[in-house]
Amino acid sequence: MTTRKMNADSELAQYAILAETTLQMSRWKGQEEINARRFHNMHTACTLVDGVALKPNEVFSLRRFLKDSSGKLGFQEGPVIINGEVVFATGGSVCAVATLVFDAALKANLAILEKHNHSTDMWGESRFIHLGGDAAYVYGRKDLKFRNSHNSDIIVKAAFDHNNMMLSCRIYALTPLPGTVRIDIRLLQEIVPPEQEGHKYRNGCIVSTRRYLRMTNDRETLTYSKNEVYQPFRLRETNE
């Protein structure tokens, strides 16, 4: 793999924005130490992928840059979702950056090679991106990969704004897309868990994500299709 990092922002002078994504983060109430670690890890992950440059047909793999999200790379202990439960591990919260980069790559009509959703809709209406838009990252098991299927070089820029708690990603290219991208997200099925005395659940669901490229002649081509399952999430007493 010959993926490189751009040497300076001056390289962007000849590029145009192919796609852009911003994600608004929020603080966990009463947990400022955890918030500091979450935001630190988001910033660290953005720094590691910021400036990645890909030639046509080269592959971006998040694993190449985040690796095991260890302290050696500057990551701290943060929250991680495992089987619908929040636990703490080094590198926790990097999934927010995986989600950020995936959404930008999807909008840029790049070829998505590998993407995994989270197992449950843990956050409900407070989620920071729609279902089907989240991307999980687990070293050695769940990666985010896409290929530069564009006809020119592209550059990925990512950043975390601490003041506004905002993640942002732009994908630049030397030439614009040959058409416009349309993304269609649909709820295919709601998954209702069996009743269990004393327990409450948020329903699960199956979500469909389809991406189309519309050319100047108004003809649309399907360029991405994925159905994803979110299992029911057991609500804790504090969420009831």
Image: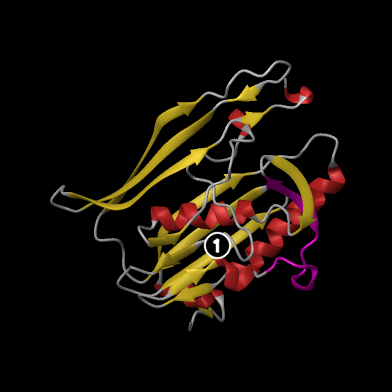
Q: Amino acid at mark 1?
A: Asp
Above/below status of 220 relative to 41? above
- Residues rendered magenta in the picture: 68-82
Expressed as whole percent of the image width and height from the top left, the position of residue 96 reads 62, 51
Q: Is residue 118 left or right of residue 31?
A: left
Nearer the observer, 209 or 106: 209
Q: Quadrant of residue 51?
A: bottom right
- Farthest residue to the bottom: give it: 2
Expressed as whole percent of the image width and height from the top left, the position of residue 82 reads 69, 47
Q: Quadrant of the C terminus?
A: top right
- Is residue 164 something one can see in this rendering? no
Q: Is residue 210 left or right of residue 168?
A: left
- Residue at 49% in and 79% down: 3
Asked if the magenta segment contains residue 20, the reply would be no
Expressed as whole percent of the image width and height from the top left, the position of residue 139 reads 64, 64
Q: Is residue 140 left or right of residue 150?
A: right
Q: Quadrant of residue 9?
A: bottom right
Residue on which the image places disc 1: 143
